[in-house]
Image (cartoon, rainbow, N blue to C red):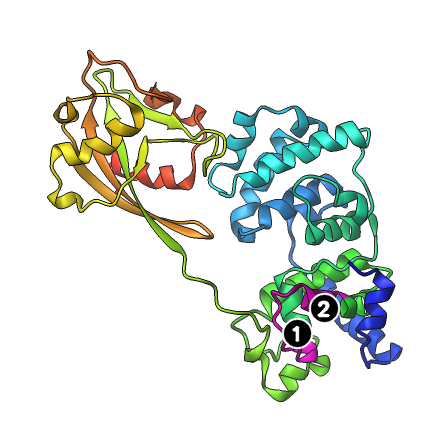
Amino acid sequence: MKTRQELIETYPISWSQTKIKAFRKALLNWYDQMGRSLPWRENQDPYSIWVSEIMLQQTQVKTVIPYYQRFMTTLPNVAALAKASEEQILSLWQGLGYYSRVRNMQTAAQEIVTNFDGQFPQTKAELLTLKGIGDYTAAAIASMAFGQVEPALDGNLIRIVTRLFEIDHDVTKAKTKQELLGILYQLIDPDRPGDFNQAMMDLGATVMTPDNLNINASPLKEFDLSYQHGTAKNYPNKPKKKKSKSQHFLAYYISNEKGQWLMRQHQEGELLQGLWHYPMVEADLVIEAASQDELSQPFIEKYHVLEGQADRLNLAVRGHVKHVFSHRIWQVDILEGTWPKDLPLGDNLEWVDLDHLSDHPHSSLQEKMYQYNFDLGEE
């Protein structure tokens, strides 16, 4: 990775210093009047900024706010996060998805306690040594909490800069990102680097959005080549995403004579690790035409139960949910059944009382499946 000075020298812009200062003034004046009021902007606490930035990855601001507030109330500082139980952090994260984020956060918090005496590192280079913190997050924390002159290159900044300068290179390429960083190092306000980054993010989120091509409200239109040429729709240039892989599963909603539900905690290395769900098996069946034996067999083989007694579950089709991850789609058929009271449980299975469901962190996929149990229909 090139240094800041090397990036500036490699990707110089043709703007005069007067124009650069006018650009900064236009952007920051707009931000001072129109910037979003968000709870993590109430102070410059690096922990607050870090929590918000990790939550905002792949998640909309309006969704994040209540999660952020609950997380900060429960785990208000690095030390509290470092010593929290996995069950607690998963419960606080429940519904946000991408659970590796919060696991990495806890590891990073423990690294801060161990390697930095509990004090948040202040430079981008030091922040990059922490688990789960990449270039963008490190730059965001360094600039917003510590006033470091570091551009935080997220999707909003990529879109704005490529439109400003009509840069048509593939923005998924590392070289293009270096070019954009080189430009931003020349544009960023050295006196207000954190505000500069947040102003660009807000502008990209509210005015210079992916779909808003008639950006008369933009404070940067006099600097924006794509606005002047009517070419905003061409930027940024990024290849179309590959079609997500679709997988089919059977989920077994099984109860016993005590009214308990059969649940399984996903094991280490599995997708949704540490979270609780109905027992699930990947199986591609036309369930409407399947026999009791065909419906039960995947469950029997995976959990080593009910050998030769497939019909004792009395399975019936309960419903279907579709769940979209970033890189795959799960099509899940829910089967309802009753557990024979004289049989032991299989591998990694556990009975859970209805009033203890909240003690078992689960994903939004399981939340969708719960809808059928309470006869609320599919979301």
Query: Residue 126 occupies which quadrant of the picture?
Result: top right
Relative height, residue 285 to residue 296 (above, below) = below
The dot on residue 337 is none
Q: Is residue 168 one of those drawn in magenta?
A: yes
Estimate the x, y position of residue 148 in percent, counting from the top left. Answer: 83, 53
Residue position for label 1: 162
Quick one: 345 or 54, which is closer to the camera?
A: 345
- Left or right relative to 75: residue 239: left
Quick one: 374 or 229, which is closer to the camera?
A: 229
The dot on residue 180 is 2
| Residue at the spot 43% in from the left edge and 38% down from the top edge | 363
Q: Residue furthest top?
A: 342
| Residue at the spot 48% in from the left edge and 30% down from the top edge | 274
Question: Is residue 378 at all visible to an observer of this figure?
Answer: no
Q: Residue furthest bottom?
A: 229
Q: Secondary structure at mark 1?
A: helix
| Residue at the spot 77% in from the left edge and 45% down from the top edge | 44
Residue type, numbered disc 1: Thr
Relative height, residue 50 to residue 79 (above, below) = below
Estimate the x, y position of residue 119 in percent, counting from the top left. Answer: 81, 33
Query: Residue 265 occupies which quadrant of the picture?
Result: top left
Question: Is residue 104 at all visible to an observer of this figure?
Answer: yes
- Left or right relative to 43: residue 366: left
Residue type, numbered disc 2: Leu
Query: Residue 10 occupies which quadrant of the picture?
Result: bottom right
- Which label's residue is closer to the chain start, 2 or 1? 1
Could you tell me if the residues under marks 2 and 1 are in contact, i.e. CB atoms within 8 Å? yes
| Residue at the spot 72% in from the left edge and 40% down from the top edge | 130
Which span of residues is magenta-colored? 162-181
Q: Is residue 270 one of those drawn in magenta?
A: no
Distance CA(mark 2)–CA(mark 1): 8 Å
Quick one: 9 or 34, which is closer to the camera?
A: 9
